[in-house]
Image (tube, helix red, strand yellow):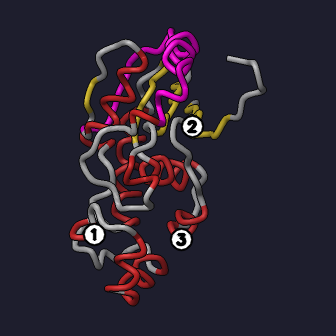
Amino acid sequence: MQATRLTLICHARTVAQKRVCFGLEEPVDANWLAQRPDVGPQVRHRYRNVRQLLCGPELRTRQTAALFGAHPEVIQALADCDFGRWRGLSLDEVLKAEPQAVQAWLDDPDAAPHGGESVAGLCRRIGAWLASLQEQPGHWLAVTHPFVIRAALVNVLDCPAATFNRLDIEPLSAVELRFNGVWRLRTQALGQE
């Protein structure tokens, strides 16, 4: 049986990320991306044999997926976490206005004081999406969000949802997962494809 290979790539940086804001519908930071002129050719070469290119529905994921030179399939399950009324606000702004709510959100994966999606809910959504790929062999490439990648790692590593906030995902970073009876995190040696 051929394995399912899933490469999760975090979208390029946005101004909201730079300002430590909760995600909103915005483009990638063109100035940040312009400082990396070799990104497009590198990613197109490295992932030239993918079975399917997927991305979340937001503009920043679609723009990042365009670096691969193909038309991605937009997958609703890869959407960013719904931050409710905190969307677009900086963490500092929310901490000043609602310090107890932020603490509850950080301490309890089931909490959603912003009125959006809880971390536990996001982990369940991504767990269901991962399960849908288990019988789909080949290499899948998905451009998505830091929170979505964190949720995938919590699922694959079978960690408690409280582990979620201990994971950092950088813009344009990649996480490699394989399914062959069980999901595994796979690292790669430098210079290896």
Report the amino acid beneath label 1: Trp
Reply yes or no: does residue 104 show up in magenta. no
Nearer to us in this view, 135 or 126: 126
Whether residue 1 is visible here, answered yes or no, is: no
Report the amino acid beneath label 2: Ser
Nearer to us in this view, 131 or 48: 48
Q: Which residue is mark 2?
A: 173
Mark whose residue sits in front, 3 or 2: 2
For residue 66, side relative to residue 25 (left or right): right
Q: Which residues are magenta?
A: 32-57
Image location (x, y in percent) of residue 139: 49, 20
Image location (x, y in percent) of residue 184: 62, 39
The vertical placement of 149 against 49, above or below, is below
Distance between mark 3 and mark 2 Cα atoms: 22 Å
Distance between mark 1 and mark 2 Cα atoms: 25 Å
What element does badge 1 sit on?
helix
What element does badge 3 sit on?
helix
Taking the view exactly as shown, the residue that stands out farthest to the bottom is 100
* Residue under the image location 41 percent in, 71 percent down: 91
* Residue under the image location 36 percent in, 42 percent down: 129
Report the amino acid beneath label 3: Ala
As drawn, the label of residue 106 is: none
Whether residue 112 is visible here, answered yes or no, is: yes
Nearer to us in this view, 44 or 161: 44
Q: Which residue is mark 1?
A: 86
* Residue under the image location 42 percent in, 41 percent down: 130
Q: Which residue is mark 3?
A: 162
User: Which of disc 3 and disc 1 is earlier in sequence?
Assistant: 1
